[in-house]
Each structure stands twice: as C-alpha cells, then as structure tokens.
C-alpha cells in the first residue's frame, strides 16, 4: 500500500475537483497521460471513488484502489491473501493473475 498525497488543502474528499478532472482526462485520452502519474508511475486517486489516502497499487496498470473499494472477486481474494504481485480486477480480467488465483 501507499499513501497518496493531498494535492492541495481540502483535496482529501472523495470525488474532489482535481480527481474528477483527472478521471475525465483519462477517459478522453483513452490512456493515462504521464502528467497525471506520480513519481512511482501510479495515479494519485482511487479508480473507484476518486479519493486519496491509503491505497493499493496494481502491478499491471497505473491505477490505485482503497482496499474497501476493490470489488469482490479474484482480485479482492488475491489482496486478502497478500499476493505479490497484486493485480486489480481489470487486469485480472485481462489475464494477469496473482499467485493464489493463477
């Protein structure tokens, strides 16, 4: 897990204007523009709720998720089993698998 930084004061709410703008830019571009990635190559906002805080980084894509935002299924089971590498539900559907689900 990592802790995503506040971009500015008051930016720790879910669905903040900065997070919504990021999600919109990603949807329009069809990919994640480099200017929206942190130094570690991951986005700052949870893909599901657009919030910041303690998040899990997918090892197959630049998206991050709050553990509670990960939908039930293989990806959530993999996280609960503490698999490394860990893949989000989208990457699991694309065929990337963690240890306990492979």
Image (cartoon, rainbow, N blue to C red):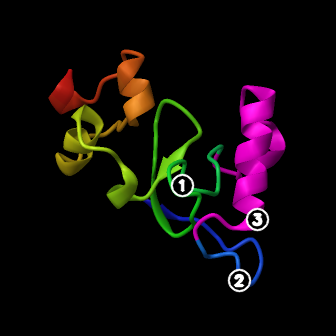
**Dot 2: within a 10 Å radius of its alpha carbon, few (fewer than 14), some, or many (20 or more) residues?**
few
**Compared to 61, does 44 lie above or below?**
below
**First in sequence: mark 3 or mark 2?**
2
User: Between tags 1 and 3, which lies in front?
Assistant: 3
Q: Earlier in the sequence, mark 1 or mark 2?
A: 2
* Label 1 with label 2: CB-CB less than 8 Å: no
- Taking the spot 35% from the left edge, 57% from the top edge, the residue there is 67
Q: Quadrant of the C terminus?
A: top left
Task: Answer left or right for 7 relative to 101.
Answer: right
Residue at 16% in and 31% down: 100
Q: Nearer the viewer, residue 6 or 70?
A: 70
Residue 7, above or below 30:
below
Question: Horizontal and vertical percent for residue 46?
Answer: 54, 55
Residue 29 in magenta?
yes
Q: Residue 10 bears which disc, if any? A: 2
User: Looking at the rendering, which quadrant does residue 14 occupy?
Assistant: bottom right
Instruction: Give the residue number, with chain letter if any, for mark 1.
Output: 46
Query: Which residue position is annotated with label 3?
Result: 17
- Counting from the top left corner in percent of width and height, residue 98 is at 28, 30
Q: CA distance from mark 1 to mark 3?
A: 14 Å
Mark 3, Cα crowd under 10 Å, few <14 / some 14-19 / many 20+, is few
Q: Which residues are magenta?
A: 14-40
Q: Secondary structure at mark 2?
A: loop
Instruction: Give percent across and percent down for residue 84.
Output: 31, 40
Left or right relative to 63: residue 18: right
Q: Secondary structure at mark 1?
A: loop
Q: How far, Cα to Cα, is label 1 from label 2?
A: 16 Å
Give the residue furthest to the bottom: 9
Along the polypeptide, which appears first: circle 1 or circle 3? 3
Taking 3 as reference, is 45 left or right? right
Quarter holding the N terminus is bottom left
């Amino acid at each position: 897990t990592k802790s995503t930084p506040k971009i500015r004061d008051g930016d720790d709410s879910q669905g903040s204007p900065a997070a919504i703008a990021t999600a919109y830019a990603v949807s329009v571009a069809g990919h994640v523009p480099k200017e929206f990635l942190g130094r570690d190559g991951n986005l700052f906002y949870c893909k599901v709720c657009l919030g910041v805080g303690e998040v899990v980084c997918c090892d197959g894509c630049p998206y991050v998720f709050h553990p509670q935002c990960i939908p039930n299924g293989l990806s959530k089971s993999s996280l609960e089993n503490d698999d490394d590498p860990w893949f989000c539900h989208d990457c699991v559907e694309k065929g990337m698998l963690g240890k306990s689900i492979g």
